[in-house]
Image: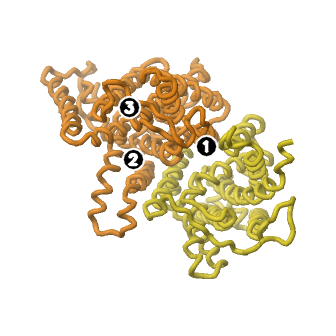
Chain colours: A yellow, B orange
Amino acid sequence: MILALSLGRPIVLGLVQGAAFGLVAIGLVLIYKSSRVFNFAAGEFATLGAFGYYLANDHVPLWAAAVVGTLVGVGAGLVTERLVVRPLANRPKVTVLVATAATAITIIALQFLLGATGKTFSVKPLIAGTLPFRVFGVFVSWQQLLIVVVLVLAGGALALFFAFTDLGLATLAASQEPTASRLMGIRINRVAMLTWAVAGGLGGLAGVLLSPTLGNFTPAYGTTDLLTQSFTAAVLGGMTSMPGAFLGGIVLGLVQNMAQFNISPDKVPGAQFAAVLVVLVAVLAIRPTGILGKEA
Amino acid sequence: MTATLERPDTDEPAEAARHDGGGRFRPTAAGWGGRAAVGVGVLLVALWYCLHFSQGRSDILASGLVIAVGALSLNVLVGYVGQIARGHQAFIGIGAFTAAYVIGQSGQSFYVGLLAGAAVGAVQAIVLGLIALRVRGLYFALVTLSWGVVAENCFFRLKGFTGGGAGATAPRPGGFTTDRAFFVMCAIVLSVVLLVDWRLMSTKAGRAFQAIRESPAVAANYGVNVQLYTLYAFAVAGTYAGVAGALYAARRVTIQSADFSFASIALTYLIVTVVGGLRRRGGIVLFAVLYVLGGQYLPGWVRSMPIGDTLKANAGYLVQALSGLLAILTLIFQPEGLGTFTAPLGRWLKGGRFHLGHGGGGAEGINVRP
């Protein structure tokens, strides 16, 4: 009965946010596949992308600003790989996890240092306006449609890349057998740089595309609004499966918005976050390999 | 990194024993006097710092001691049993709001609140520990991350429990209402926690923690009840965190859900633990104090330099940014943290020979099985 009251908005918003989770989650899976590292700085890649888009918003055409935002994400990924992850290559993976968390807090503190505290940053959508018809009784903006389309395109492109190109196969090989791959002439460091660049770019893109649908964003919003959800999406998908991360993102977006719109915040505040935890624990307890998980 | 169930020679590394011809080194009377003098000297400096300056200085030091207790709690999980925990805002916050509820709303004394915070902190930690029994390593880090987010956004916003946005109040105990006196309270509590932690690690449980960290399978083969001792460690960590939370609440008097954010508690405490040094109590306490002193003095110092107005206005965040960088540098270059530098002094104070070198105690940095 309560569910019937609010079904359209959670579905639409769930798909849109789920697409952003999916983009970040694909980046997390990429990094996990190639180097077995959990990247806790992923949320901040998205924030930095959104900031790049915001700062370029007034100076260049919007599509160029989106490119700038994505490139900021790529840069953040590359810098993190080179300065934080590579020096720790032979350490326990949890050390790297803590180091990426330290990277996240450094990036967050830098945003505060540069005066972002307590402000909200409003950004223009890449495509203004809404679709001429309703979906599930809800108006959908072009920007919201765009983010879902981009997720599908990015997921498809990456799947093709890993299945059919030499570089993609090299990346997969390097993740499974680093030593043998090196002996076969694959440059492990290049592969790592590539995966971090792509993951950073996906994060940046998620930040660029999601922030206009929210209307505005706050500093560190990638960590508060994307990180936990994207990780849960990746785990739900099996942590090693890119289509899984894609699906996981969408499922999690839907679950989160169903909880948010149908559970009164007066009774249970923050139900959307509780829903994420429930999904995470349930997946780990019942099916740790996720929906589509298999090794490599 | 071999698993061992023998008593680790933390206090007497092998080289010291060799110099003594096998006998245990004992300082002379003058040696003990020197050690006592150094201890008293440190106390005097702290006393001078608190009494000579305004009350606010004591309050800053007190906040450092609260962070130290919280970081020691994290040290039990990450350092002793090797479970990476990313949601300490839940641990600290649950202790803080429980204490505030017991003290402020139920009108009990501070000490009852402290005990209640510790007890509830332990219970929630055991619940998380039950999950840790099934899910280890990186995946457990995710569960704790999510747990922290849920605590932050759900539990701490329940009006009946935390007062919603207005916050909850936890008055300080009689005799400790001033900042100076409350600093003494924090120092006493920290001393008790340090003492308990030190003795705990010398018990069977302490050695079991170490064995579980090295390898749960090997530990089980040696007859260590892995499940029981993992839960034990979580209970200990939760107790420390609850105590830290109660102190946090009483120091601030009024607490709000926004105080217990992921960045301000979970990340900060993790960084203090890592930079201070895992399994290095002295290093952790030292860096906790340095962290708050840095927060106090760095901004003023930076503001006197020719930099942009934005930077000057936000210089308060400098210590957070620097500590993040410091944590990365620590992990890369000095995985044992600041504790490496304080360990020789600590050994000497406890009555050992003074020699450089980090000694035993498992110095391999973070060591968690994925």
Mark in front: 3 vs 2: 2
Mark in front: 3 vs 1: 1
Q: Which mark is residue B334?
A: 2
Q: Can see residue B90?
A: yes
Say whether disc 3 or disc 2 marks the residue closer to the N-terminus.
2
Q: Residue at x 74, y 56 (%)?
A: A18
Q: Residues within 10 Å of mark 1 (few under 14, many from 20)?
A: many
Q: Chain of mark 2?
A: B
- The x, y position of residue A96, in whole percent, is 53, 49
Q: Amino acid at mark 2?
A: Gln
Q: Residue furthest left?
A: B30
Q: Which mark is residue A135?
A: none
Q: Residue at x 51, y 23 (%)?
A: B106
Q: Residue at x 75, y 40 (%)?
A: A283
Q: Amino acid at mark 3?
A: Gly
Q: Which mark is residue B360?
A: 3
Q: Amino acid at mark 1?
A: Asn
